Amino acid sequence: MSVVPTTLAVSVARRPSALGRLLRRPSAATAVGVVGAFVVIALAAPWLAPFDPVATDFGAVRKAPSMLHRLGTDEVGRDVLARLIWGARASLLAGLIPVTMAVLVSIPLGLVSGYAGGWIDDLIMRITDAMLAIPFLIVAIALAAFLGPSLTNAMIAIGIAALPVFLRLARNTVLAVKAEEYVEAARALGGSPLRIGARAILPNMLPPLVIQSSLTVAAAIIAESSLSFLGLGQQPPAPSWGSMLNAAQRYLSQAPWMALYPGLAIFAIVLALNVLGDGLRDVLDPKHR
Amino acid sequence: MRSTRILTAFLVLALLEAGVASAQTVLRIGLNDDPDALDPTISRAYVGRLVFAAFCDKLFDVTPDLKIVPQLATGYEWGAGGRSVVIRLRPGVKFHDGEPFNAEAVRFNIERHLSTPGSFRKSEIGEIKTVDIVNDLTVRFNLAEPLVPLIAALTDRSGMMVSPKAARELGDKFGTRPVCAGPFKFVERVAQGKIVGERFAEYWDKANIHVDRIEFVPITDSTARLANLRSGDLQMIERVSPTDLAQVRADGKLKVVGIAELGYQMLPLNLNNGPRGKVLGADPRIRQAIDLAIDRETIIKTVFNNEYLPGNQFVSPVSPFYNAKLPVKRRDVARARQLLREAGHPNLAFTLIVPPERDRQEAALVIQAMLAEAGITMTIQTQENVTMLSAGRKGDFEAYFTFWSGRPDPDGNIFAFTTCSGGQNDSKYCNQDVDAILTKARHEADPAERKKLYDQTTEIMLRDLPRLILWHRRVFTGLNGKVQGFTPHPDGIIRFKGLKLS
Amino acid sequence: MTLPRYVARRLVVLVPTLFFVSLLIFSLQQLLPGDAAVALAGEEHDPVAVAAIRQKYHLDRPVPIQYAIWMGRVLRGDFGESMRNKIPVSQLLAAKLPVTVELAVCSMAIALLIGIPAGIIAAVKQGRPVAVAANVLALSGLSVPHFWLGIMLILLFAVHLGWLPASGYVSPWEDLRRNLATIALPSFVLGTGVGGIMMRHTRGAMVETLGADYVRTARAKSVRERMVVLKHALRNALIPVVTLGAIEFGRLLSGAVLTEQIFAIPGFGKMLVDGVFNRDYAVVQGVVLVSAGLYVLLNLAGDVLAFLVNPRLRGSA
């Protein structure tokens, strides 16, 4: 972790580092705190969880929050708090990894597609159209049947499903930026496409992608649950926030706490990531430097 | 303005229509799922039977206590050696298209069940070789082998009579527009939306039908289905979840009735279906150990609010064919461990395939925890339903979690599952003694003698355990307080006779 | 390139795209374990019946031949029939397309009504409480599970207040008032979800353009603030919103399964999911093909809109 601030400090030596500027904003600092807390919770789950997350207690099924079970128990008497803490692992992975994958793939492809235009653009975009039209469900069941159940495979499926949106967004931003005066100027001056792409276009592509990423995390966390329900992803009895929500669905009136807490956790992480995204956008924005 | 005038006319029409609609009594029923084709010959899904009850009458029906009573038939007599049966038909019955119901129509229907490719009825009544027309209102079925359960099969889709004229005209599209002789005439179907019927004016028993219009609405989500009952959008819903019962009972405007089902929930175990049969097929003591480690009462208490019935046999404890000498055993972890040691598998591990359905998912979690206490590691593998079923056929499983909707005659609950070449025998269990007993039971007309044969079967089943039968649901129907005259049937199917909306 | 030529070229590419989609879907479906015959038989397995069904629907033939048979029919305008309920797929599609489109249009309208104003407010009043409130509201719309919101709305509006029906769909030609009543809650559930996405992108893009040179110039020329925001900034900010709008609209067409299920609305989403679970190939193919066509057209419309909204794009598309 210590590598990142140092390199940033070197590259923008005259001003405080991007991280420093980010942390100076109270809202962004809070968001970093929340995301950090979730990561810590996920890592320290074995020490934080008050109970074994898979230990059933048939004598205490769907019990309301009490001193013993702070957030109540679920449909087979497992402690909701313990499952929430352990579930952070699967859910953070399922939320963050596929989105990162989608961003990393969509930046180069979007640049090529938008900048080169012509048949390359047509090809990439028509494949994107096709991908958007393929039902996620079929991909998921096919993957579950052939790769077998695992969280990694679920993340691949979610990544595939999220990719087309990122790709389209990246490509359309490139198109818009390409027409800007400063890019035209750079082209007129004979700058290499690679250089123009990296220096002039990339920074402008990031803001919408950052926003989309912070939004997709919620969808990805929820998607993991439907996948685990189809046999891909976290297998029972191991917890994830999504699968907790899934189990809660039929007990909305009898045991509302079962849906409430995983729902709040997802809301908190999504809110924090979005606020963080806003902060990042501001400190990375070339026009604000 | 022209558009305003059109709009006014439109609203007036809408109001008129609403006025007409309120004069009619409409019964809206919430189903658990969207049925498959509405053709009795090729229909398979259980939920379709609820819809058929409105449109298609059968030769016979069963009462709540499983007595066979006439419907489109008026009576039957077995011929010599049980190789033929004569059925007398009700006079004056008309199909929805005005065609007469007679011996010719019965012959047409039976032949249609037997000869249509993809017919799911052939396995039920395949023993019928020919149908003779004795006179306009009497038929004789000639059988290849005696088949006592035949009459029971005629109380379900095998006994449903469709209009021969419509069946010829519509061909394999019949299921999109069924024409039968039931209390309601098919009006329209919006797939995944609704199925609508209106009262058939020339129904043979029309004095007993008091509802003008009927609508079946599939709502998969049980919470949403219940909310629709509470809001008054639906007057009747099938399969109320046991955990929702308290809510229904607390609502003064609603009623709920329940009755033990004919079917059962079970774990078929792979004994000899390919290489994956090696684990659980190795020794019956292994299966007995699993059986002893499961506490059925606790599953039912935990997951189903104690509303279902623990079971261990292919008929439920309330059935006259239940072997009362062999009730559900008490859980015995020590004995289970001992059996595993004797069988040489003290650290048994196997995988249970469970479909993505909450009831079975939750029960599987409970079973997993119980088996762990006996030193058995059971891995739960979730597989989408069709994936699981095809794994079952192919033998790509050690155990899976399924159910049987049940039949009024015990034969329908056991024969195809347990005989060596039975169509549903995924375990590939094969025991010549069992085959002989079950075949004999098909020939035996005396209920007392049949009971003895099924008791014998149960004894063998509980020793060999090719599948673990776990519990019998009680089918709960939720009703609006206005619905009168509803009697629950163990098959879960609604009888419209006498049903009223006050 | 001129706009009409661009549109014409895109429309020509529609055909190979759809062909590619159908091929992809067909192959993917073959990868799924089990087939329609097994799905139809379900728990009640009868080997003879299953074999007969396989034969009838050519499921016993090699995959390329199955594809050729299917394609040959489609070219003659026959999408086949649902193996499960025997209804012709074209009839199913025709019945569900209007429902699906109406639900998507209403949801999108709600999404835009919530998303764009909230996004503008959040951008213009950055850091103020009202902006924070707009953010929290939009994001809660996004992270609330659809099933939860759906059930809560039914309990409130149908069970307790009795203002709206809990389920079902009534065609607008049959009864406009009841049509709107049945479509209101599901559109709201879907609209709040998409509205969150729209809001975030509107806000992001507005912040961006409000800081751009030409907006600063306009401000320096003392153009009225409202004009600056609405005319100069919003116009340019709309590009990602239009792109996303087109995609999300497409998703609403076939991806609203949970909502359709809870409100018993017979749309494409439920049809597709049931089709996949029942291995009802003709149904899946039909829905995917139609929704793929709509996707492509929507994305094209999105590109054209972006082109029209942003004058700087002209000449570069």
Image: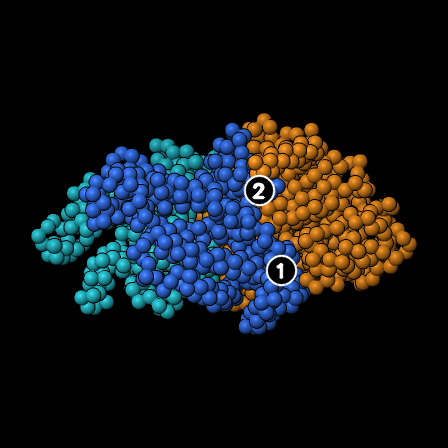
Number of other residues with Cα within 10 Å of mark 2, as a class: few under 14, some 14 to 19, many 20 or more: some
- For the N terminus of chain A, the quadrant is bottom left
Horizontal side of A99 relative to C246 (left or right) equals left
* x and y, in percent, of residue A14 in the image: 8, 52
Answer with mark 1 or mark 2, whichever residue precedes in sequence: 1
Chain shaded cyan: A
Instruction: Tell me the SS state at disc 1.
Output: loop
Q: Position of residue C285 (x, y in %)?
A: 54, 61
Q: Residue at x 29, y 56 (%)?
A: C312
Three-letter code for the amino acid on which mark 1 is drawn: Glu
Instruction: Please tell me whether mark 2 sits on a helix, a strand or a loop.
Output: loop
In the rendering, at what x and y percent does residue C284 appear?
54, 59
Is residue A173 in view?
Answer: no
At 42% across and 55% down in the image, what residue appears? C301
Q: Chain C in the picture: what colour?
A: blue
Q: Is residue A10 above or below residue C148?
A: below
Residues B360 and C137: in front is: C137
Instruction: Look at mark 1 in the image and give the residue it sits on.
Output: C81
Q: Could you say which chain is coloured orange in the image?
A: B
Chain of the residue under label 2 = C
Q: What's the distance in space between the residues labelled 1 and 2, CA to CA?
A: 27 Å
Question: In the figure, is residue C58 to the left or right of C108?
Answer: right
Disc number for residue C172: 2
Q: Nearer the viewer, mark 1 or mark 2?
A: 2
- Which label sits on residue C259? none
